[in-house]
Structure formats: C-alpha cells, structure tokens
Image (spheres, rainbow, N blue to C red):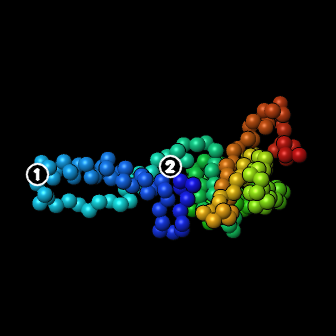
Amino acid sequence: WTDATEGPDTWSPYVLVGHPVHGERTDWIPRARIILAQGADRRFTPFDRFAQLRESEGKYRRVVESIREGIFQTNPMGELTLVNSAFAAITGKSLEQIVGAPLSRFVDEADRGAVEEMIARLPALLETGELPPPLDARMAGPQGETRLVRFTVRPVIDTHGEQAGVAGTLDDVTEAKLAQQGSGNARITDLTE
C-alpha cells in the first residue's frame, strides 16, 4: 500500500513521507544554516521536488539489476513493461527487443499454453490469496539453444483492487535439471516431460 498511487501524476504514501525527509536532509536544514550565517537576502536555487523520487528509483533499480533471476512485469494485455538485465541475458535479447513484446513470444511454442494458463488463473486466485506453483518451460537462449526456465508469477493489483498485469521471475534451471538427471546427455525436452 505504501507504493500505491491514485493514477498518473499522483504520489504514493512512500513519496509523500519521503519527500519532506529528503528535503530536510538535503535542502531545508542547509538553507536555514546559510540564512542564519549570511542573512535572509540570499537567493537559492529552486527546491528539486523530484530528487527523492530519483534517488529512490536509483536504489530500486540497483537492487533489481543485482538479482540473477530475470524479473518482469506486464500490463493487462500481457506486454512486458519492465524487465531487468538478467531477463535480457537469459533470452539473449536487448531490452529494446523485449519491452512492449508479449511475454508469450519468448516461451517455446510447446510450452506457451501452459504459461498462458498459469497467468490466466491469477484472477481467480486473487480471492484466495494463493499463487500458482512455479512452472518450468522452454525458451530460446542467447545462441538460439533451448533453455529450461522456471516461471513464478503473481498479479499486480491497482489501487482499486483490480489486476493490472502480472509480475514474476524466471530462473534458468537448465544446468541444475541436467545435473539432477545425472547425465550430460539428457535433452531439455526430456526434462520437461
């Protein structure tokens, strides 16, 4: 709830509290000290209303980019709106090729239905609070090779309690599954059956 807004150009409770805290730390106290030392006629640069938001977004982005699992978020149409660099590395695609594309485009055709079904079940699960179990699916890797990834998904809920998309992770589990099978000769298709 601390990150929820009432729509575009509105502020969340986190920003409403963080804004004056940031201002006190970086602007208001230093300005008061200057006024006390140099007098009230001193001119100041305008207060940067968005500095706290940029600082917070920068911290968030560093955390998201440091995680080795692919992180993604879609809009209600299933188009990817946010991915981290790990998602790009797993798929071998650039961020420009990924953002705006449907998530299903990156899933092997044989597994696309299972991933779409997992996502389609989310609205019914909202009432119970349950999440679907992780799902292993095939994707094309950076060199076009087949990779096995584990999808986890959860609904993104807007301020009205409605589903506004999907957020999730994907983890490349190819090597772990091959090692679990105990044979370097196992094929990815064997691992999903």
Is there CB contact under 8 Å for labels 1 and 2? no
Give the percent coordinates (x, y) of residue 187: 83, 42
Q: Is residue 181 left or right of residue 100?
A: right
Q: Quadrant of residue 165?
A: bottom right
Q: Is residue 59 visible?
A: yes
| Front one among 164 and 33 | 33
Which one is closest to the eye, mark 1 or mark 2?
1
Q: Earlier in the sequence, mark 1 or mark 2?
A: 1
Q: Residue at the far right: name it.
A: 193
Quarter of the rendering occupied by the N terminus: bottom right
Q: Is residue 143 visible?
A: no
The amino acid sitting under disc 2 is Tyr
The amino acid sitting under disc 1 is Gln
- Secondary structure state at the residue bearing disc 2: helix
Which residue is drawn at the image coordinates 45% and 56% (left, top)?
15
Which residue is tagged 2? 60
Give the percent coordinates (x, y) of residue 17: 43, 53
Q: Is residue 174 above or below residue 156?
A: above
Give the percent coordinates (x, y) of residue 143: 68, 50
| Front one among 160 and 191 | 160
Give the percent coordinates (x, y) of residue 140: 73, 53
| Front one among 130 and 117 | 130
Which class describes the residues within 10 Å of circle 1: few (<14), some (14-19), or many (20+)? few
Which residue is drawn at the image coordinates 49% and 59% (left, top)?
12
Which residue is drawn at the image coordinates 60% and 55% (left, top)?
83
Q: Is residue 133 left or right of residue 25?
A: right
Which residue is drawn at the image coordinates 76% and 61% (left, top)?
123
C-alpha distance separating marks 1 and 2: 38 Å
Q: Which mark is residue 185?
A: none
- Secondary structure state at the residue bearing disc 1: helix
Which residue is tagged 1? 38
